[in-house]
């Protein structure tokens, strides 16, 4: 999985300072933002991939990530928080070859894994359990797209 910075502890991320401890609500918002990106990315793959297998996998994962997105959105609303909206666009690969598409999909899952890692670090037991499950699922999906296994999925390489 490629290493992309992010998470509630990073300086400049959504205006949060490094020394600010993220709340469960912050972590849910971070995960929701990652799901918005995944839905957008998999919709792109579904339309751009040359082979039927990639299009079918992307179509299935669009539905899976939409369900996760909706679950996170609901959790934020139930907390009285304003869910972050989807952006109008997200970065997309310029190369549409099979290897590039696979790397892009693995990176989408890496981004999801990093977001769910923050949820798994929540002080709230239910959020920790949800985050850990979703982190594991994202790591498996990344591997299915040909991503490299990480000793500690979701963590930045040191």
Image: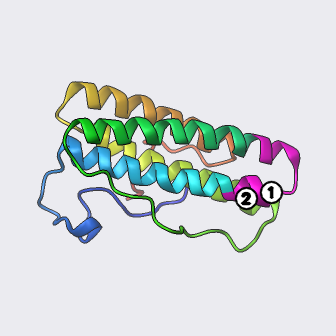
Say whether residue 19 is left or right of residue 84.
left
Q: Are marks 1 and 2 in contact (CB under 8 Å)?
A: yes
The location of residue 5, given as percent across then percent down, is: 39, 64
Residue in the image at 36% along x and 42% along y: 73
Q: Nearer the viewer, residue 142 or 94?
A: 94
Position of residue 122 relative to residue 105, above or below, is above
Position of residue 10 relative to residue 34, above or below, is below
Quadrant hosting residue 93: bottom right
Q: Could you tell me how far apart the alpha carbons at marks 1 and 2 are, in whole angstroms?
A: 7 Å
Mark 2 lies on a secondary structure that is: helix
Residue in the image at 73% along x and 59% along y: 101
Observer able to see residue 154: no
Q: Badge 1 local density, few (<14 within 10 Å), some, or many (20+)?
A: some
Q: Which residue is mark 1?
A: 49
Residue in the image at 87% along x and 57% along y: 50
Observer able to see residue 157: yes
The location of residue 33, given as percent across then percent down, is: 40, 54
Say whether residue 155 is left or right of residue 26.
right
Q: Which residue is mark 2?
A: 101
The location of residue 89, given as percent across then percent down, is: 54, 69
Report the magenta stretch's main SS: helix
Position of residue 40 relative to residue 149, above or below, is below
Q: Is residue 79 magenta?
A: no
> Which segment did they paint magenta?
44-56
Say whether residue 120 is left or right of residue 101.
left
The location of residue 91, given as percent across then percent down, is: 56, 70
Mark 1 lies on a secondary structure that is: loop
């Amino acid at each position: 999985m490629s290493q992309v910075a992010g998470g509630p502890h990073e300086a400049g991320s959504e205006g949060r300072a490094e020394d600010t401890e993220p709340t469960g609500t912050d972590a849910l918002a971070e995960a929701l933002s990652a799901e918005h990106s995944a839905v957008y990315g998999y919709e792109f793959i579904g339309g751009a991939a040359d082979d039927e297998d990639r299009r079918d996998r992307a179509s299935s994962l669009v539905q899976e990530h939409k369900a996760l997105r909706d679950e996170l959105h609901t959790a934020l609303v139930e907390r009285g928080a304003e869910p972050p909206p989807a952006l109008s666009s997200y970065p997309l690969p310029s190369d549409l070859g099979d290897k590039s598409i696979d790397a892009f999909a693995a990176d989408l899952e890496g981004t999801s894994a990093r977001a769910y890692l923050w949820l798994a670090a929540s002080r709230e037991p239910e959020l920790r359990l949800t985050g850990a499950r979703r982190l594991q699922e994202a790591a498996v999906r990344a591997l299915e797209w040909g991503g490299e296994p990480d000793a500690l999925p979701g963590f930045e390489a040191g």
